[in-house]
Image (cartoon, helix red, strand yellow):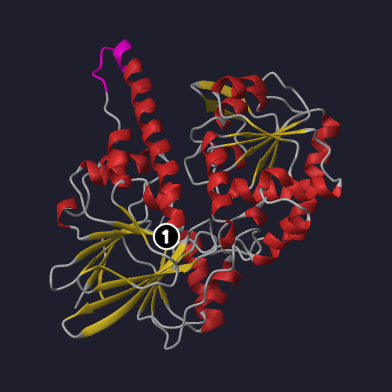
């Protein structure tokens, strides 16, 4: 029988990676994600792959986020030259994500090498380079939702809308091996059904094995109206306090959601600030890709934009100011009050947001709004967990700003939404929980048992199962 090996995002959130092998020798890699968070987790990114890259016949990708795609350039650097299958929108977003990731790798290595040189230590090499990213991008093969594609001998893949970010997919994989056909379904990252712009995740009913994410397996998100009311009050309080509002946000997905909601506030007269800065070159470019694929938006949100005479998210929020150039970004730090600053990265482990934190985190009149999950070991997690001081750009900074978390803005399904999606499967396939901290997985595992009478498995890193 075919084998499935659990390589990454096992009892942790990031680093998605799974290997499917048939007895005929076909090998397909499902996801090639980067680990993010603690230094010891990220150190695994430079280790040898758990497989021979040259032996792979194909790579299949659920969506463009770095924890699912971020090691593709390294795979290409190690000699992989086969196809990388993804949806059309994911293929476009990948160019932004991987080139940006390569730039960060190169700059981080350059910075670290300078410090090492002062200590008489040898320079370090980046995990991968822009050339490696370009090589990986040349391997992309676009597949539309709902269109079966034979990605390798005996392996057929169909993508279904996961509703997480633009182009995100639930991966349905049929594995034909010695007259036996088995169906594997990987949820990818399932979207929050309350999120704007994206459609709801597609329910599926047939599978032999299901891999389901569990990022928020321990709880449900707040309902959207309550979350929006809380955000509106935070913005009003920040205006009264005379400070800025910083929002660390992922450039793809979360940023577009926030701009949609802030546009709603503006249209309703509920936005007291006079300027919203989008300080992320990647997010600005991502907006353009979202616009090109606007037919993928949820019909009701697309109709709302049309009724208000706008076709772009930027037009929905007229006070939006995009700052792609470094000098424009630096100029924002001269503003001490009245601004909303949206910048990456979403977990504050790099990007322009760290510069804004350096200038605002110690100001008690400022407000920091975290609209999404903060992985262990990240600067964002330290701030959310109440650290009195944090290290920002190699300097110790006091945390005096008011810190807010808004789980209702998550682009991931909450516990009840996960249960609602998985209960559509007939005949109770084998169920494995991935993409979650182990404590949250155990809570979801118990909920599946109590509410659906379904036993879910929590695999170990490196574990193999027969399909």
Position of the C terminus, as image quadrant, is: bottom left
From which residue to which does the magenta span run? Answer: 116-123
Badge 1 crowding class, 10 Å Cα cut-off, few under 14, some 14 to 19, many 20 or more, is many
In the rendered structure, the answer to whether residue 431 lies left or right of residue 407 reads left
Magenta stretch: includes residue 120? yes
- Position of 220 with respect to 335 (left or right) is left
Q: Quadrant of the N terminus?
A: bottom left
Eyeballing the image, is 215 above or below 22?
above
Image position of 347 with respect to 227: above or below:
above
Q: Considering only vertical position in the picture, is 207 above or below 439?
A: below
Residue 288 visible in this rendered orientation of the protein: yes
- Residue 434's x, y, as percent? 41, 63
Count of marks overlaid on the render: 1
Q: Is residue 16 magenta?
A: no
Is 391 or 173 nearer to us in this picture?
Answer: 173
Q: Residue at the location (41% across, 47% down)?
A: 94
Residue 22 location in percent, x, y? 18, 72
| Residue receiving disc 1 | 87
């Amino acid at each position: 029988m075919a084998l499935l090996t659990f390589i990454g995002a096992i009892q942790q959130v990031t680093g998605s990676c799974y290997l499917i092998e048939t007895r005929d020798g076909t090998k397909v890699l499902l996801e090639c994600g980067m680990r993010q968070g603690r230094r010891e987790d990220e150190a695994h990114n430079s280790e040898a792959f758990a497989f021979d890259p040259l032996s792979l016949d194909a790579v299949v990708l659920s969506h463009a986020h770095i924890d699912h795609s971020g090691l593709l350039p390294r795979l290409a650097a190690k000699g992989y030259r086969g196809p990388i299958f993804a949806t059309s929108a994911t293929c476009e977003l990948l160019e932004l994500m991987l080139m940006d990731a390569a730039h960060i790798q190169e700059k981080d290595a350059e910075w670290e090498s300078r410090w090492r040189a002062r200590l008489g230590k040898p320079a370090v090499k980046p995990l991968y380079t822009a050339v490696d990213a370009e090589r990986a991008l040349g391997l992309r093969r676009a597949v539309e939702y709902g269109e079966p594609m034979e990605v390798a001998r005996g392996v057929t893949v169909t993508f279904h809308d996961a509703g997480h970010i633009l182009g995100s997919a639930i991966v349905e994989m049929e594995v034909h091996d010695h007259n036996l056909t088995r169906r594997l379904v990987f949820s990818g990252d399932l979207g929050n059904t309350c999120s704007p712009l994206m459609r709801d995740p597609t329910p599926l009913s047939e599978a032999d094995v299901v891999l389901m994410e569990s990022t928020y397996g321990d709880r449900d998100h707040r309902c959207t109206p309550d979350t929006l009311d809380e955000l509106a009050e935070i913005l009003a309080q920040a205006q009264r306090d005379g400070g800025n509002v910083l929002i660390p946000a992922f450039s793809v997905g979360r940023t577009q959601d926030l701009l949609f909601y802030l546009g709603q506030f503006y249209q309703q007269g509920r936005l007291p600030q006079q300027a919203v800065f989008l300080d992320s070159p990647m997010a600005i470019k991502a907006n353009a890709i979202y616009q090109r694929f606007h037919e993928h938006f949820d019909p009701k949100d697309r109709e709302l934009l049309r009724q208000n005479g706008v076709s772009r998210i930027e037009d929905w929020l007229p006070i939006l100011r995009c700052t792609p150039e470094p000098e424009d970004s630096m100029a924002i730090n001269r503003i001490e009050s009245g601004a909303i600053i949206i910048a990456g990265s979403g977990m504050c482990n790099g990007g322009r947001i760290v510069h804004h934190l350096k200038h605002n985190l110690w100001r008690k009149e400022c407000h920091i709004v975290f609209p999404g999950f903060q992985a262990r070991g990240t600067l964002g997690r330290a701030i959310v967990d109440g650290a009195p001081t944090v290290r920002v750009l190699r300097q110790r900074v006091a945390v005096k700003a008011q810190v807010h978390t808004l789980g209702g803005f998550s682009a991931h399904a909450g516990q009840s939404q996960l249960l609602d999606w998985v209960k559509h499967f007939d005949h109770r396939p084998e169920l494995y929980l991935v993409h979650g901290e182990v404590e949250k997985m155990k809570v979801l595992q118990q909920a599946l048992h109590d509410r659906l009478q379904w036993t879910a498995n929590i695999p170990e890193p490196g574990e193999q199962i027969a399909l």
